[in-house]
Image (cartoon, rainbow, N blue to C red):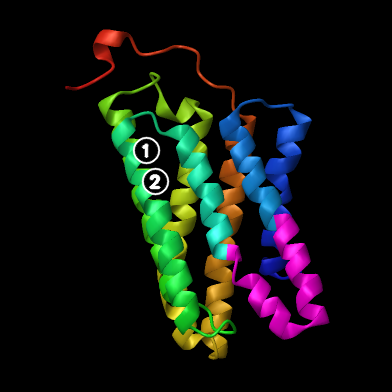
Amino acid sequence: MHIDDIARLTTLLPVIVYFSFKKKGKLLQAIVFFNTFYLVYDFLYYLIRNFDKEMGDYFNLFYVPLEYLLIYYFFRILYKSKSSLKFLNYTVLFFLTFWAVSSYFIPVSTFNSILNGLESLIVIILTLIYFYEEIKAPQSLFIYSQPQFWGVIGFFLFFAGSFFVFLYKQTYKQEELFREQYSYIHSSFFILRNLLFSIALFIRPEKVKIPNERSSFT
């Protein structure tokens, strides 16, 4: 079994954990929605591409914007401050506009490295905003005892680890050596993300809160 196939199978892990332990909460549901979306989309893309390759390319055009909308939904639930939420709203408008414009100029059969790189960069920034909020106004004594921490770390490591291979894929995807390296790097971080999502869905939230007078450094 190739590492790509193993990566696809790990997408099921967070979904299985969620329904096995009957977890609740919008944030955890957002993680499950994200993985379920990937499973359904990957299956439909496989069917459509085998029926008509060009139709599959057009269908695949919508993967990245839909993926980002689900990431947006995750951080929309996560953020507490109005400034962070406002910034988040700006990013989704900017990203969808950029997707529409870049998709017009780049052929549908070509991997859009700029779009994928931009998505990675935005998500990395969103995760850093979360950590800034936690430093400024911590919600619990130990950040790693909260499910959202593992979800954010999952997004951060995946997009940070895949950032450069996304940028190079459009140019070097025809080279066999690059395709092999891309497969191992992307799949490894994909597996890691799903494992961290599973931890987020498995862990019990810490109930001890930071006292109000210690909730901010300002």
Residue 95 visible (yes or no):
yes
Would you name the residue on which mark 1 appears?
Answer: 85
Give the percent coordinates (x, y) of residue 107: 53, 85
Quadrant location, the C terminus: top left
The residue carrying mark 2 is 89
Q: Is residue 59 magenta?
A: yes
Crowding around mark 2 (Cα neighbors within 10 Å: few <14, some 14 to 19, many 20+) is: few
Decide if residue 13 is on the left or right side of residue 180. right
Relative to 97, is 62 on the left or the right?
right
Q: Secondary structure at mark 1?
A: helix
Left or right of residue 138, residue 184 in this image: right
Magenta stretch encompasses residue 73: no
Q: CA distance from mark 1 to mark 2?
A: 6 Å
Residue at 53%, 75% in the rendered image:
182
Extent of the magenta region: 39-63
The residue lying furthest to the left in this view is 218
Q: Secondary structure at mark 2?
A: helix
Amino acid carrying label 1: it is: Leu
| Rendered residue at 59%/22% (across/down) | 204
- Most common secondary structure along the magenta stretch: helix
Find out whether the residues at labels 1 and 2 contact each other: C-beta distance under 8 Å.
yes
**Image disc number at residue 142:** none
Image quadrant holding the N terminus, namely: bottom right
Establish if 212 lies above or below 187.
above
Q: Could you tell me the amino acid type at mark 2?
A: Asn
| Residue 110 at x, y percent in the picture | 54, 84
Q: Is residue 28 above or below residue 167?
A: above
Q: Is residue 165 visible?
A: no
